[in-house]
Amino acid sequence: MLAELVEDKVILKDAKDANRLYNKGFFGNGKLNLIEACYLLEKEKMEIVKKGEKINILDFVEYSLKYIPDFEIKYLVYRDLRERGYIVRVNNDFYLYERGKRPPAKPAFTVKAFSERAKFKIREIEDLILKAKNKLMIGIVDEEGDLTYYIAKFFDIKGKISERSYEGDIILLNDRCIVFDKELAEKLKQDFIGRDFGKYVQLSLMEAAYVSMKGAKILKEGKEISMEEFIEHAKNIQPDIEERLKAYIELRKLKLLPKTGFKFGSHFRVYDSIVEKTHAPYLIHVVDNDYEATWAEISRAVRLAHSVKKEMIFCKVGEELRYIRLRRVTP
């Protein structure tokens, strides 16, 4: 079948060919997007002319880059999904239909395509989730042309670990705290807060701040200090403690227990039930609105979480806290 390249569209010459393409594979509707047309050209389902002369696939791709700067990235994602047998419609984004479903049914996913080298800010992912009319799938193209897919969504998490108040003294050292107070130490042990060293309990700065907010006192060189003084001290050691503490406090309100996630390359590993009877199902990394990363960094984080049977969640701290889960999938 023959089609003509006109600016950023490819127009089929014969209406019967247009109907056949749409009815069989839901390609275009008389007019094809450049990405759809490139796929049909590669598969030799179509010949394309420009000003009366046939155009080969290399020339077509170079031409398309003028209209779609990241054309090759988007095309590889589109091509991969089509090769897997899915119906994919193009309208700035890709709309992916479940197997066996087709227009006019509602697509299952909005698909965005990125290069592995592309940088992104967490608020951009937040905006994509908000704007997607359905589930958001992100397709990442590596330098060899292989594809990795992630589902990105806002994630609601809740647990079964209750909070309570505390009394007693916490001793501030420098980058951590200790508790010798027997009654307070026993409560902390029962609640799996801090590290049990037998005669005393060691608390991180984060844990110490939380326990103090729940009623305990923080002492430095034998004198009680205010929360403001403690945070000022802690910021010299852990500059982002205020952001992390916001997340820690909300996670506790959600009846979850955060513990350090250092061994897993994240801020927290998070338990949703009794610690001694279960593994932490979540890894949570706390970021602000301007957090920027590459997809290679995300790939490492998600793969590590998956290898230890945990969900990788980013907690975006702003006016409100948002939990964004990224899970690797195979379409």
Image (cartoon, rainbow, N blue to C red):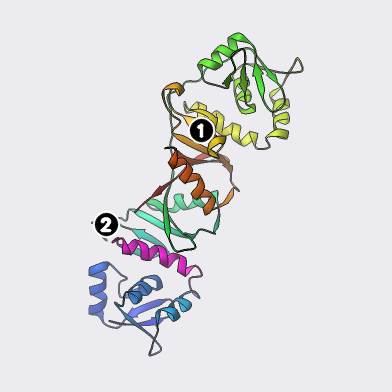
> Image check: 328 left or right of 167?
left
Judge whether 45 appears above or below 318 on screen: below
Q: Earlier in the sequence, mark 2 or mark 1?
A: 2
Q: Is residue 29 above or below residue 113?
A: below
Label 2 to label 1: alpha-carbon separation: 40 Å
Residue that sits furthest to the bottom in the current view? 52
- Which SS class for mark 2? loop
Residue 132 image offset from top left, x and y in percent? 42, 53
Q: Which residue is mark 2?
A: 105
Q: Is residue 61 left or right of residue 210?
A: left
| Residue at image coords 27%, 81% | 1
Identify the magenta region: 67-88
- Crowding at mark 1 (Cα within 10 Å: few <14, some 14-19, many 20+): many
Question: Which of 238/68 is in front?
Answer: 238
Above-or-below relation of 298 to 168: below
> Residue 116, relative to residue 58: is it above or below?
above
Which residue is labeled 1 in the image? 269
Task: Please say whether residue 98 is visible from this viewpoint.
Answer: yes
Residue 282 tag number? none
Q: In the shown orientation, is residue 109 left or right of residue 1?
A: right
- Location of residue 25 (image quadrant): bottom left
Could you say where residue 238 lies in the image, as x and y percent from the top left?
Answer: 67, 35
Q: Residues within 10 Å of mark 2 (few under 14, many from 20)?
A: few
Q: Percent from the top left, x then y, of residue 57? A: 40, 79
In percent of the image, x 45 and y 81: which residue is there?
59
Q: Quadrant of the C terminus?
A: bottom left
Residue type at tag 2 = Ala
Q: Residue at x 39, y 70 (%)?
A: 35
